Image: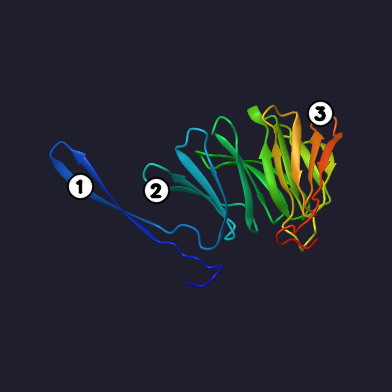
Amino acid sequence: MKQGSVLITCLFILWSWSGKAQSLKTVIQNGHLSVIKTVAHTPDGNYILTGSRDKTIKLWEVATGREMRTFFGHENTVNDIAVDQSGKLFVSSSADGKAILWDVLTGERLKEFDMKGDYLTAVDLSTYGRWLVTAGFDYKAYLWDLHTGDTLRSFKVNPDKGLGYGISAAFSTNNKIVYFGNDNSTITAYDVENGTLLFEYERLRGSCGGCAS
């Protein structure tokens, strides 16, 4: 098996009964053609979504392991996925510089949030789907209105552009704070409403674990 080029072929044999009749159904699933970079699950636990270096996202049914749908639209590696609280929508971020809002069940591409080429490593959704945050190799992370697609504000972050991993991002449970993990081994926290830096945790000693700083 070559590294970075993984072809998983799954053969599922599903038996279904109708009265006394027995039928055999064969479903061949290809899975991803390259490294899986991110995994997310729907709130009800019935489905998982996987994003890959093969530029696609796949929807899987947990109970059966069946591949339900493939989402096409990104032009580079899919790095992160966030599912909304309803489980009906999700957002993906990619090295192509775009975040895309999708309908889970239909596969429809609902909206694009374009960073104009800057590599994206992280995306997160606030509770109830009001806001979206994106971050990556840009020195700013951005807060978006999920419904209008407008950029609301930016937050200073610290990526080692092209050398480190990039930025990680997450909303607090009450949606009042957004946290960023930076390539320089700091954690920064901002007020979502006004963009004020609330605090910064710095490392005291040791390595950042592989980043360029």
Crowding around mark 1 (Cα neighbors within 10 Å: few <14, some 14 to 19, many 20+) is few
Left or right of 128 on screen, residue 153:
right
Q: Quadrant of the C terminus?
A: bottom right
Disc marking residue 23: 1
Mark 1 or 3, closer to the camera: 3
> Regarding mark 2 in the picture, which secondary structure is present there?
loop
Q: Where's residue 135, x and y in %? A: 75, 47
The residue positioned 54% from the left and 34% from the top of the image is: 88
Please state which amino acid type lies under the numbered disc 1.
Answer: Ser
Determine contact: label 1, label 3, CB under 8 Å. no
Which residue carries the number 2 mark?
A: 66
The residue positioned 45% from the left and 46% from the top of the image is: 60
Please state which amino acid type lies under the numbered disc 3.
Answer: Glu
Number of callouts: 3
Q: Where's residue 172, x and y in %? A: 70, 33
Judge whether 1 appears above or below 127 on screen.
below
Left or right of 213 on screen, residue 81:
left
Disc marking residue 11: none
Judge whether 67 appears above or below 44 on screen.
below
Crowding around mark 3 (Cα neighbors within 10 Å: few <14, some 14 to 19, many 20+) is few
Along the line of sight, the residue nearer the viewer: 122 or 93: 122
Which residue carries the number 3 mark?
A: 193
Report the Cα–Cα distance between label 1 and label 3. 58 Å
Seen as rendered, the residue at the extreme left is: 20
Mark 1 or 2, closer to the camera: 2
Please state which amino acid type lies under the numbered disc 2.
Answer: Arg
- Quarter of the image for residue 3 reads bottom right
Q: Where's residue 98, x and y in %? A: 71, 50
Left or right of 90 on screen, residue 33:
left
Seen as rendered, the residue at the extreme front is: 205
Q: Where's residue 80, x and y in %? A: 63, 49
